[in-house]
Image (cartoon, rainbow, N blue to C red):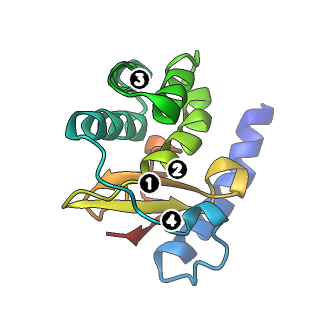
């Protein structure tokens, strides 16, 4: 009952907040993580594709596919990227993976974006601190809320 009440109260607020961002909000409410950082060389294609597969799987609420993509990313990577991918893949539920996806996405955002990909930002993700992710194209495909708020966010870099 409490969960339904919470959804009844928060969901309209969330829709209003996302609508203001989608309709040309100033973006001043973005966290520091939304600011582009100095770009490194491109991430190897196979690793980038594994990250994108995990982002797309989260956006459609698929725990199994997300975890498989993260495991593939971890197996092929090293350093901080591997550490973050392993941590996300080890989580037992989709909400936990979504929390672990925040620092992983920040790490991937440090690399140059391949053609046809964008850096997106959702001000409501990460307990209203905001969070970035990299995705294909310009149509928002939010991994932090999945189907419940798939289009919440904005493109901050192409």
Q: Earlier along the polypeptide chain: callout 2 or callout 3?
A: 3
* Residue highlighted by disc 4: 37
> Mark 2 and mark 4: span between their CA atoms?
10 Å
* Residue highlighted by disc 2: 106
Q: Earlier along the polypeptide chain: callout 1 or callout 3?
A: 3
Q: Earlier along the polypeptide chain: callout 1 or callout 4?
A: 4
Does the residue at mark 1 contact the one at mark 4 (Cβ under 8 Å)?
yes
Residue under the image location 22 percent in, 33 percent down: 46
Does the residue at mark 1 contact the one at mark 2 (Cβ under 8 Å)?
yes
> Mark 1 and mark 4: span between their CA atoms?
8 Å
Of 152 and 33, which appears nearest the observer?
A: 33
Q: Position of residue 36 (x, y in %)?
A: 49, 68
**Residue 148 visible within the image:** no
Does the residue at mark 4 contact the one at mark 3 (Cβ under 8 Å)?
no
Q: Earlier along the polypeptide chain: callout 4 or callout 3?
A: 4
**Mark 1 Cα-neighbour bin, 10 Å: few <14, some 14–19, many ≥20:** many
| Count of numbered badges drawn on the protein | 4
Residue under the image location 59 percent in, 30 percent down: 95
* Residue highlighted by disc 3: 74
Does the residue at mark 2 contact the one at mark 4 (Cβ under 8 Å)?
no
Of 68 and 144, which appears nearest the observer?
A: 68
Dividing the picture into quadrants, the one containing residue 156 is bottom left
Residue under the image location 53 percent in, 38 percent down: 101
Dividing the picture into quadrants, the one containing residue 13 is bottom right
> Mark 4 and mark 3: span between their CA atoms?
23 Å
> Mark 1 and mark 3: span between their CA atoms?
16 Å
Q: Earlier along the polypeptide chain: callout 2 or callout 4?
A: 4
Q: Is residue 127 left or right of residue 35?
A: right
* Residue highlighted by disc 1: 109
Quadrant into which the C terminus falls: bottom left
């Amino acid at each position: 009952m409490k969960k339904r009440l919470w959804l009844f109260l928060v969901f309209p607020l969330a829709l209003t907040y996302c609508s203001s961002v989608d309709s040309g909000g100033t973006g001043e409410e973005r966290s520091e993580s939304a600011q582009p950082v100095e770009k490194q060389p491109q991430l190897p294609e196979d690793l980038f594709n594994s990250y994108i597969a995990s982002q797309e799987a989260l956006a459609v609420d698929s725990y199994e596919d997300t975890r498989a993509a993260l495991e593939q990313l971890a197996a092929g990577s090293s350093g901080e990227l591997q550490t973050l991918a392993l941590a996300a893949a080890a989580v037992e539920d989709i909400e936990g993976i979504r929390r672990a996806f925040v620092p992983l996405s920040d790490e991937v955002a440090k690399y140059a974006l391949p053609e046809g990909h964008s850096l997106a930002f959702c001000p409501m993700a990460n307990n209203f601190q905001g969070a970035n992710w990299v995705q294909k194209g310009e149509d928002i495909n939010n991994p932090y809320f999945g189907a419940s708020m798939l289009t919440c966010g904005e493109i901050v870099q192409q």
